Amino acid sequence: MSSPPSSNGHPLVEVITCGTKGFVSILHISDTHNEWVEPAHMPPADILIHTGDFSHRGNQGEFQAFNHWLGEVAHLYPVRIVVLGNHDMMTYGRRKFPKMASLLPNATHVPNVGLFEVCGLRMLSLPYLNYESVAMQTAIATLSEHSDIDLLLTHAPAFGVLDLSHSQIQCGCAAIAELVRVVRPKCHLFGHVHEENGFRHNGFEGVLSINSSLCDHPVTGIVNAGHLVAFDLQHGAIASCCAVDVHVDAEVEADVAYRFDDLFLRDGESPESSNKTRAAPRIPHGA
């Protein structure tokens, strides 16, 4: 272990500094529903990923407000990726995806269904689709052709993984669960189910699942933590993951980081016990 110096006023989480190319750090958030996180409360990272439902109705005014917020945090995140959720598509509909993407010029990427690469990381994206639709079946078939994937970005969770609603109904998607099994990304980022914010190993061949829904249910404000993930580029592995309270001052104690090895369920351990959502500051991008 090593303890890198602080950066931008935020204490850094201790991580393993293996590899000479350093780390790529990602702040993941989701389901903010017109609630804006103050930039002062957000730890910097190389990439910001929002996995959908930044709005309530997906109208032009909400797109414009979110785009303005993306501009306000651009100095913290050189890359800003937005995956559209079901609420974001309510006004324009999926067939007008190019129109919706054009309304977010302050995002560096608004990916449709497909493969793209950012900062040396291979990512698959899947904006929200009706679970049983032909469009979903087609998208899953297309995405399943890819391999060696670092990140799978979806709005909805895989069925059975951090998808339990307040009414004790599993709201995840079976098609996405099958995609995870086939593609086996190193990490799956999503939101949609506000009640299941957290991260854990989901049993699908070593995939780390992260639900970063920030708002509660029903929506009254931001109450949950976002998550920071660090990728070791040289070894092609996740180096560390931790939760960060973006709705409070980000300068918190630095003793609550978790090694990737610590995220896996052990014999007799329940999913709830591995669902670590305590606050932590940013993960460094270099040794």
Image: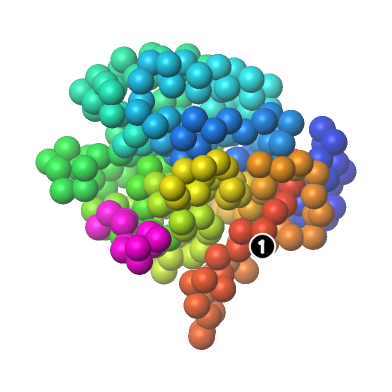
Depth order, front residue of 223/109: 223
Q: Which residue is mark 1?
A: 259
Tell me if residue 153 can be seen. Answer: yes
Q: Quadrant of the C terminus?
A: top right
> Which picture quadrant has residue 97?
top left
**Dot 1 surroundings within 10 Å: few (below 14), some, or many (20 or more)?**
some
Residue 92 rendering spot, x and y as whole percentages? 26, 21
Q: Amino acid at mark 1?
A: Arg
Q: How is the image coloured?
A: rainbow
Depth order, front residue of 81/34: 34
Residue 216 rendering spot, x and y as whole percentages? 50, 49
- Asked if 214 appears above or below 56 in the picture, the reply is below
Q: Does 274 sit left or right of 13 as displayed?
A: left
Residue 7 rendering spot, x and y as whole percentages? 82, 36
Q: Does 112 sit left or right of 26 as displayed?
A: left
User: What secondary structure characterizes most of the magenta part?
Assistant: loop
Name the residue: 74% across, 31% down: 40
Assess whether residue 114 is covered by the magenta stretch.
no
Q: Which residue is situated farthest in the right direction here?
A: 5
Depth order, front residue of 267/216: 216
Q: Which residue is situated farthest in the bottom direction here?
A: 268
- Asked if 49 appears above or below 66 in the picture, the reply is below
Name the residue: 39% across, 32% down: 56
From which residue to which does the magenta span run? 164-174
Q: Quadrant of the N terminus?
A: bottom right
Name the residue: 47% across, 43% down: 219
Residue 101 rendering spot, x and y as whole percentages? 37, 19
Tell me if residue 239 can be seen. Answer: no
